[in-house]
Image: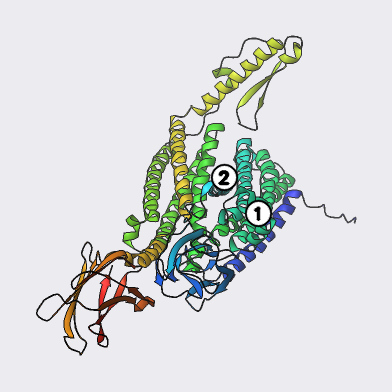
Amino acid sequence: MTATAPAPPPARVRAAAVLPRLALVLAALLALLFAAAGPASAHAALTASDPGEGAVVATAPAQVTLSFSEKVALGEDSIRVLDPRGKRVDTGEIRDMCSGSTIRYGTALHPGLPDGTYTVAWQAVSADSHPIAGAFTFSIGAPSETTVALPERQAGGGPVGAAYGLARYAAYAGFTVLVGACAFILACWRRGAAVRPMQKLVLRAWVVLTAATLAMLVLRHPYTGSGNFADVFDLAGLKAVLATKTGAALVSRLLLLGAAALFIAVLFGAFARRQATAPEGGAVAAETAADEQDGKEDSRDAADLFFGLAVAGSVFAAGIAATWALSEHASTGLQNGIAMPVDVLHLLAAAAWLGGLTALLVALYTVPEVEREAVRRFSRIAFAGVVVLVATGAYQSWRQLGSWQALTGTSYGRLLIIKGALVAVLVGVAYLSRRWTARLGEAPAVDAAADVPAPAAAPGAVSRETSTETGVSRETSTAAADVPGDPERAAQLARQRAARENALRRQARDADPARAGLRRSVLAEAAVAVAVLAVTTVLTSTEPGRVVAQEAGRNGASAPAVPNRAVKITLPFDTGGVNGKGSVRLELDPGRTGSNTLHVWAESPDGAPLDLPEVKVAFTLPAKEVGPLPASPDRAGPGHWSAPGVQLPLAGEWRIDVTVRTSEIDQTTVQKTVKIG
């Protein structure tokens, strides 16, 4: 008996064996990434500073410190302190003063700073990848004029910010179409793998996503830094970006896209060839016992190939979605261990629905004979995607808003309302599409010879073949070869053939009224989906409602406690000497933060004006360790003193100390605490 060596497995079988293993490895890496991702922060906000914004301190501080709501990334020049002439007076060294839940950073100041107003400009990158920046002033001794202009450009703004935002939108669009179209082919319409328009759609989506990711990587440094396009060529800046969480996510996305290229090659190679050569309905002829055995082996190979593609495609899609979840809003704030997987599900559901919708639209307009069952399968998948989107979107909205007030009182909440309204419109249009799908009939076979008049007679033979790109019969004429010396006639014949093919395509496409209605409703869905995607992109770069509430809590103390009403107090005093008894009446107008006018009246016990040798006033805010801030009123008349431009930089419970001297040796200090808004 002669032994024969087994034949090497065909390429499609080898691909089917490799893809599941590759998918399992990627799944393990993805699980490791989720496990290693520790608690992060929300879109960070500056919660406090020392000295405070607008504070007037008696002596020069040794350092300036900034406190944030969450972890931030700071560079060497992230905190700059400038004197009134614009000269930098900090040492440039960032001090990490974080302890427990307190997030604080600082920079030391040069000793011996003179009196005047100083400007603190800071810039950082929050843990959800978005740049944040700000500036404020404080004064030593007393406020002064300053030549420093506070920056008007917002962090992440300008032309670089616009380019980065465009790349972000393109990345979302590319991901949605890439994942959704591949899912549509595998789950709904396997024959679509051999259709050229579908192949072009997937390949273009892959190119868009890859190019957008590369653009975001090279723009990242100028986007979070200077805002100048020239910094794209700063290799040191690019190296710094690669060391960040966002840089690692972008590089991981590029690596996954490189591996996904193998998946696409198999999908449009071995899988497409098998679908193109499979008999109608997928049945395998088995006229003999040997043919039947071959048919079973082919079916088993096809099942293995499909399984490998399905598993690999799922892992690739989840991995690419995770690069967003691990580096943006989902990775920060409350319950990030739950929020990241939820965000991955949200992105995958959106891609399955909106990307599959795009694929269906291309199929309906370019391939008239899309099977009714394929459309119905997609209808079921889209419905499941909507359910997942609503559930995951509601959870993420609760995480990022934190209160009902934030829904209408913040930009993030208002964008969520707009997105919800657009999704509601999208669901309504999708309902119409489902109704058209229920009435959908199979595309009738089109007999081109019977239904469409042939073009004008032309010399040469005419043969009919089926286009693998559209599935519509077309005639290929040899007339051009018969009249090589008559290019005008050849061009005329080419136009006739094109007109005939277009007529055949339109006839096949419009043969079923339900199919025409479905095309219109799907086109409307796609138009609304573009708007939903745009709003989603803006949401990813908008400060969440929770963070806005934190900032409002920090700045809310600046609101006037008693608006439009001066602070008026009366304090009795007794210096112990002759004529040492009386009272001082003090008025601070308007009694709010900022500049105030101070009036002091001294009266004897019988209410007559008391002309004292000296009156001094000081303001102290113990809660913020601000003060005492001296105010030396000038004599305005008998028993009356005034001082304009008294600066109270912060809101809070201020202690007012009034020192009264009735003789060379007799004096006393009386005090009272008032609320300054």
Horizontal side of residue 492 vs 645, given as left or right: right
Whether 374 is drawn above or below 668: the answer is: above
Most foreground residue, 566 or 203? 566
- Residue 232 locus on image (x, y percent): 64, 51
Give me the C-alpha separation between circle 1 and circle 2: 19 Å
Q: How many marks are shown on the rendered structure? A: 2
Is label 2 in a helix, a strand or a loop?
helix
Q: Nearer the viewer, residue 215 or 625?
A: 625
Quadrant in which residue 23 is drawn: bottom right
Q: Is residue 446 visible?
A: no
Q: On the rendered structure, is 366 left or right of 601? A: right
Q: Residue furthest right?
A: 2
Within 10 Å of disc 2 (Cα), the crowding (few <14, some 14-19, many 20+) is: many
What's the amino acid at mark 2? Ala
Q: Residue furthest left?
A: 606
Earlier along the polypeptide chain: callout 1 or callout 2? Answer: 2
User: Measured from the top left, where is residue 50 in percent x and y?
Assistant: 45, 72
The numbered disc on residue 254 is 1
Residue at image coords 59%, 19%: 500
Q: Which mark is residue 181?
A: 2
